[in-house]
Amino acid sequence: MLNTPRGNRLHIAIFGRRNAGKSSLINALTNQDIALVSAVPGTTTDPVYKAMEILPIGPVVLIDTAGIDDEGELGALRVKKSRAVLKKADLVLLVMEAGNQVSQHEAMIAELCREKGVPLVGVLNKSDLNMAAEEQKKKYHEKLGIEPIVVSAFTGAGLLELKLAIIAAAPDAWDERTIVGDLLQPGDLAVLLVPIDKAAPKGRLILPQVQTIRDILDHHALSLVVMEGELKEALAQIAGKPKIVITDSQAFLSAAKETPPTVLLTSFSILFARYKGDLAALVKGAKAMDSLRHGDKVLLAEACTHHRVEGDIGRVKIPALLRQAVGGELEFSWSSGYGFPENLAEYRLVIHCGGCMINRREMLARIAQAQQAGVPIVNYGVAIAHLMGILPRSLSPFPELRQLLEEKNEKKGMIGHV
């Protein structure tokens, strides 16, 4: 479990006022001193992410946030960063200090959780300093609609009950989505086309490729991995046909040429668009590329920072394909890390990476953020397939989405005819 990717872990965000004992609670839950603890208010300034194992919960990411009652101009910025964590939280722990009255700050977090559909568990901390903590639970329930778990991060009292509450509140099947396994039957063969180029880490495969192989094995199917240029030979040596060919987006054209039409074909990026987000929304966003014009602003967004190589897909290859499609220059911007720029509404299109380093809740939040700003959003794999003219072929495992794309094409043709 220690090697579980962050994007596959239950994301637990911890909110509360300054000095409510959030960092102490993290240390108590993990039985480690991983969060800085101090009596000075405002010790935690920015969200801190820590991948941990909490038994019996399993692999999680704990997110320690700044106090939601922070003050002043700088404090307001810290609170804003803390609230943004809700976009990626699978579950929220609202930590309150026993003896304190419910304030507007706790009420705000509770209301935001209800609006966003994020499970909320209340924690009444420092029970060792307030013997009346158990009797106070009813008041908190009346004010917030949740009955908090009474704990002491100092003595460890109530921690087991809190862990059980976390398990009970965790979203159903939050870790049970499949990448490709639902498309396969036991014994089916999946052929994976994996280019080995400058972007490939030496001596190993990139995370989406490894996760896809593991998902295939978990569903008792067979996996054959080949390098670019070896697909035709591999298919010729196979007795019968594979169920599916999964390719890197950059090898789409050669894979489409060499894969028989009766064999399903898609890409790692398209599979992850479904696994981590909303593939239907991204397919709709692909059509927006057809209406781009010279000078339009396009944002290329990546969820993580990584070493750029010559011919980088986001910096070089996709912009080149878009310029060719538009027949002119576009205004490109790039963002890496935890969010979009504040001027998101100024863009005509967002092209997002596959999102292998973030969880599904955050990817869905990013898609929703773009939609709220009125900006179409597509991901790398879907965009490349569309620009290469093979998006319908690459959606062969998902006939309902292929039909959606064909319907949109038909409507466009009717409008043009009129």
Image (cartoon, rainbow, N blue to C red):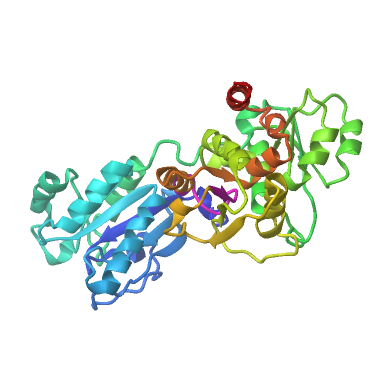
Q: In the image, is residue 312 above or below residue 36?
A: above
- Percent x, y of residue 70: 24, 69
Q: Look at 91% across and 33% down and name the residue there.
A: 237
- Percent x, y of residue 160: 30, 52
For residue 263, what is the image quadrant?
A: top right
- Percent x, y of residue 64: 36, 63
Looking at this rendering, what residue extends furthest in the front direction? 418
Q: Is residue 118 visible?
A: yes
Pick the quarter of the image with the C terminus. top right
Left or right of 44? Residue 40 is left
Closest to the observer, 329 or 168 = 329
Does 146 appear in magenta? no
Does 361 appear in magenta? yes
For residue 282, what is the image quadrant?
A: top right
- Percent x, y of residue 302: 56, 56
Q: Is residue 177 visible?
A: no
Left or right of 74? Residue 366 is right
Q: For the magenta stretch, what is the residue range?
A: 349-362
Q: In the image, is residue 317 above or below residue 69?
A: above
Left or right of 329? Residue 78 is left
Q: Look at 80% across and 40% down and name the residue there.
A: 253
| Total numbered circles | 0
Q: Look at 14% across and 60% down and name the residue there.
A: 98
